Amino acid sequence: MSTDLPVFGKAIRDQRRGLLLWALGIAVVMAIYTSSYAQVKDQGDALDSIPSGMAGAMNFDDLTSGAGFLEGTVFGLLGPLLLLIFAISTGTRAIAAPEQSGVLDLYLAYPITRRRLGYERFGALFTALSALTLLIALEVTGLASSQDMNVPAGNIVAGAVQLGLLALFFGALALCVGGVTGSRPVTLGATSAVAVGTYVLNAIASQIDGLHFLQRLTPFYWAQSTHPLRDGFSLGGVVVLLAATAVVLAVGMRSFSRRDINS
């Protein structure tokens, strides 16, 4: 691996310890919140005090059902928050951070093109996110069964995969912005702003008649509003997220391969 894919191999080795800590943290958070389902279900009447608009925007309108609870907490709030932080920070470290610190020259010492360097760094991000997505799918499937949530395992896998694709898109976006600008602060700030902005847009547009079409402009709609926990995989959602990821990655690699990194 280190011979054929030198940058990929180094990236995997460098993030092993960090990935283990992320996996541990995500596992603990998933366990805590998924295990609280029984308490939330018993307090169903108290949940009626949440304003309907807020409950709808936050996916809190059906917390007493297993699928509704997972959509509103694990897959609608905590999961995206944790995976997006990981993906955006990892994507930022792919190009922008090493370029700004001067370490990028060491990577370019390998007999590979800049475009291949970027794709190998993206491959390492994809591998890490795949591992975290698998962890979430397996853990939540086991916990949901023990909590009698009555959510099919296939639907949980669908929710985890679409969540992983959402994070992969933002990781690719961070890599793209890094390839275009070469600035760590700009990359981190711009990608985070897009993530927060599209999340808010999706939430607000879902509650206003006549603005529902705006949801389709956000990656959160294609990952969450297709309700994979209730209905299983959304082919349209998967295709859109993969296509958007491919586009931003291609744009970033094209710019990175042509830009003067010493400017």
Image: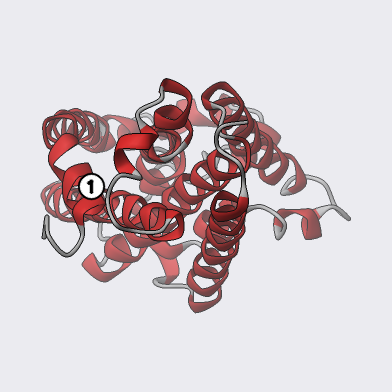
Q: In the rendered image, which quarter is residue 84 located in?
A: top left
At x 24%, y 38%, the residue is 34
Is residue 247 toward the left or the right of residue 65 in the image? Answer: right
At x 52%, y 74%, the residue is 239
At x 43%, y 41%, the residue is 63
Residue 235 placed where, x, y %? 49, 78
Decide which of 61, 104 is in the foreground and name it.
104
Q: In the rendered image, which quarter is residue 257 located in?
A: bottom right
Q: Quadrant of the N terminus?
A: bottom left
Residue 262, compared with residue 167, is above or below; it is above
Q: In the rendered image, which quarter is residue 35 located in?
A: top left
Decide which of 190, 24 is in the foreground and name it.
190
Residue 234 placed where, x, y %? 48, 73
Is residue 225 toward the left or the right of residue 9 in the image? Answer: right
Q: Quadrant of the C terminus?
A: top right
Residue 148 placed where, x, y %? 18, 52
Q: Which residue is tagged 1? A: 132
How many neighbours does mark 1 have within 10 angstroms: few (below 14), some (14-19), or many (20 or more)?
A: many
Q: How is the image coloured?
A: secondary structure
Residue 252, compared with residue 50, is above or below; it is below
Residue extending farthest right: 210
Q: Identity of the amino acid at label 1?
A: Leu
Residue extending farthest bottom: 235
Decide which of 203, 263 is in the foreground and name it.
263
At x 27%, y 29%, the residue is 39
Residue 188 placed where, x, y %? 53, 28
